[in-house]
Amino acid sequence: MIKVFIVDDSALVRQVLTACLANHPSIEVIGQAADPIFALEKMHKRWPDVLVLDVEMPRMDGITFLRKIMAERPTPAIICSTLTEAGAAITLDALAAGAVGVFTKAKVGLKESLQQLSGELIKQIEIAARSHPHAMPARNGAASAAREMPRAPEPSAAILISTTDRVVALGTSTGGTQALEVVLRQLPVDCPGIVIVQHMPEKFTAAFAQRLNQVCAIEVREARHMDRVRSGLALVAPGGRHMQLKRSGAQYFVEVLDGPPVNRHKPSVDVLFRSVAKHAAHNALGVIMTGMGDDGARGLLAMRDAGSRTVAQDEASCVVFGMPKEALRMNAAQSCESLNNLPRLIIQYASS
């Protein structure tokens, strides 16, 4: 049984969520609380496998509570909140603090909405129960120093070939918001151009990229169609769109395209990795990171077959080992590396 604890200041939400989960054969709601202080008192008596957590609550907000839990006893958490585009930054704060998923509550028709979406919540709970969350490393002066470092300049024609000769492709899903921050914060402004697919809903990726841009020395932003891939820049595929790498002479650029989901995802890691295999081949490094499912494994194999350097994140540092595990099973990854070792590996790759 998956033991679930619900923390939400709305009695209606707690009641409806409990009722939605009550008949599931492998889920047990072991408790509920109106705020984190009450929740902690109850949870210490019987600790849950998964937390379903609101953000805005009395006495202690959900993000502060999540950080406390992740520091003391990392536990899979799903954020259940009335999210809007303007509130995406709050959600990203929660994901960065260690949440493994986000479930949206409607502002109107709440009871009916929760009942209709209960299947999606159950799916997220099942995924969360199989995850292994890690506490986010404490931020220190390095992050502030990174913000003060100069951005990489736009390359001139004279240095075009050397600055666009290599591409790093990163693919990730559950747990990736934390993992990407760990990696990108440690990269210098002269690192190779980076292309990223993070499984994330539409309208969230721009805020996610903006958040990373604030704490990294390199520039990070949501990709636009025909953006050039250059040194010191990381491009994040927009939610709800696929991103592919293309090459024209010495320059790499990205295409942002619509299309059906691939491996149930849009953007898809496989779509990106296969395009990197085709257009960058031995000039690319591919890294498949924490995430549920197998998206990216076949694309990473295509990269390896094309001559790219390929790496999988190791199980110990993954929140969910699904995607890297599948890549290793296919022999798509040449090596398996810890999350903390990935920045050094990227820097070494750039200078090799």
Image: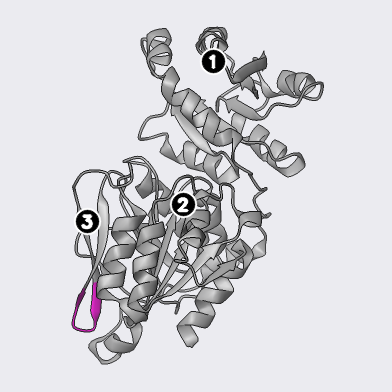
Tag 1 secondary structure:
loop
Residue 290 vertical placement versus 186 (above, below): above
Q: Residue at x 43, y 21 (%)?
A: 119
Q: Residue 158: image x %, image y %? A: 26, 92
Q: Residue 300: image x %, image y %? A: 39, 64
Question: Which amino acid, by three-letter code, is at mark 3?
Answer: Val
Residue 349 visible to an observer of this rendering: yes
Residue with the most extreme front position: 330
Residue at which label 3 appears: 256
| Crowding at mark 1 (Cα within 10 Å: few <14, some 14-19, many 20+) | few
In this rendering, which labeled residue sits more in front, label 2 or label 3? 3
Q: Residue at x 33, y 57 (%)?
A: 270
User: Residue 237's quadrant in the figure?
Assistant: bottom left
Tell me which segment is drawn in magenta.
247-252
Q: Earlier in the sequence, mark 1 or mark 2?
A: 1
What's the CA distance linking mark 1 and mark 2? 37 Å
On residue 211, the disc is 2
Of residue 84 and residue 147, the one placed in the foreground of this image is: 84
User: Residue 264's quadrant in the figure?
Assistant: top left
Residue 195 visible to an observer of this rendering: no
